[in-house]
């Protein structure tokens, strides 16, 4: 598409028919690299394909997920691609060589949304396990796990300054999460996660 201004100062979209391409399987998600060099596409066949933006020619194929990739995002510096899959994992990829930097066991159900916080390598993820999580993609550690939705989280948006994360779920609710200046101790977060996991296992056994 290209933007043109109409006589009434409205903006029109014109399809650039010469700039289209076909991929080998159904497409589930797409993410545009902030450096305007690449278009990243998630396919039903569990892979992520990276295309050159200017020509739509193939650049990289990212293999590793065992089930379809549901969601994609690219960090503001265009150094990292995050992919979330129905296999419950989030994978972090280098855009330079296409290598997988780390696979994170992110959720207990399908990962539905991944979003980098603007200007950072912090990543918010949301899944069908009702949870919202925040990750440090440089240390590969989960920073915080947030429960609130009664059912799966299907959509997520961030404010431009990353002060708010907004989630929407199958429970018909929208929830807003505000960033605070409160100091966070990761060891306490890990202990809380293990305690919650133990309680969930006990409930399943009952």
Image (cartoon, rainbow, N blue to C red):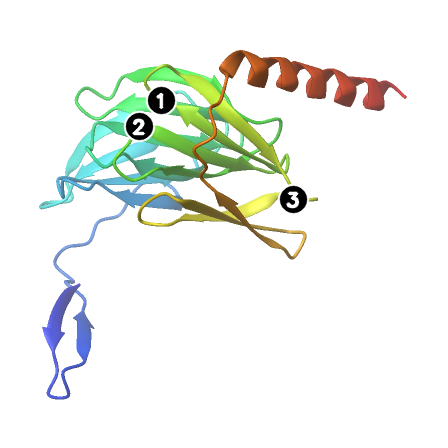
Q: Is residue 49 left or right of residue 197?
A: left
Badge 3 marks a residue whose secondary structure is: loop
Badge 2 marks a residue whose secondary structure is: loop
Mark 1, other Cα within 10 Å: few <14 / some 14–19 / many ≥20: some
The answer to which image quadrant residue 98 occupies is top left
Which residue is identified by label 3?
Answer: 149
| Furthest-bottom residue in this view | 8
Mark 3, other Cα within 10 Å: few <14 / some 14–19 / many ≥20: many
Disc sitting over residue 137 in the figure = 1
Q: Which of 117 and 38 is in front in this view?
A: 117
Does the residue at mark 2 contact the one at mark 3 (Cβ under 8 Å)? no
Q: In this view, does 71 lie above or below 184?
A: below
Q: In this view, does 158 lie above or below 109?
A: below
Residue 47 seen in the figure: no
Real-space CA distance between mark 1 and mark 2, rounded to the nearest whole angstrom: 5 Å
Does the residue at mark 1 contact the one at mark 2 (Cβ under 8 Å)? yes
Q: Which of 68 and 158 is in front in this view?
A: 158
Image x and y of residue 79, in percent = 21, 27
Q: Earlier in the sequence, mark 3 or mark 1?
A: 1
Disc sitting over residue 155 in the figure = none
Does the residue at mark 3 contact the one at mark 1 (Cβ under 8 Å)? no
């Amino acid at each position: 598409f290209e933007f043109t201004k109409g006589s009434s100062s409205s903006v029109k979209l014109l399809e650039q028919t010469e700039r289209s391409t076909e991929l080998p399987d159904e497409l589930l998600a797409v993410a545009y690299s902030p450096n305007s060099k690449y278009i990243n596409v998630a396919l039903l066949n569990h892979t992520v394909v990276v295309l050159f933006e200017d020509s739509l020619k193939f650049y990289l194929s990212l293999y590793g997920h065992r089930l379809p990739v549901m969601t994609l995002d690219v960090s503001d510096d265009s150094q990292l691609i995050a992919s979330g899959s129905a296999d419950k994992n989030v994978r972090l990829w280098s855009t330079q060589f296409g290598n997988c930097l780390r696979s994170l066991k992110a959720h207990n159900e399908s990962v539905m949304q991944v979003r980098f916080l603007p200007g950072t390598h912090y990543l918010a993820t949301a899944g069908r396990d009702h949870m919202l999580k925040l990750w440090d993609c440089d240390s590969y550690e989960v920073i915080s796990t947030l429960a609130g939705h009664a059912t799966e989280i299907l959509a997520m948006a961030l404010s431009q300054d990353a002060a708010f994360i907004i989630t929407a779920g199958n429970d018909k609710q929208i929830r807003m999460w505000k960033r605070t200046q409160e100091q966070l101790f990761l060891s306490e977060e890990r202990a809380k996660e293990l305690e919650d996991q133990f309680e969930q296992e006990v409930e399943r056994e009952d």
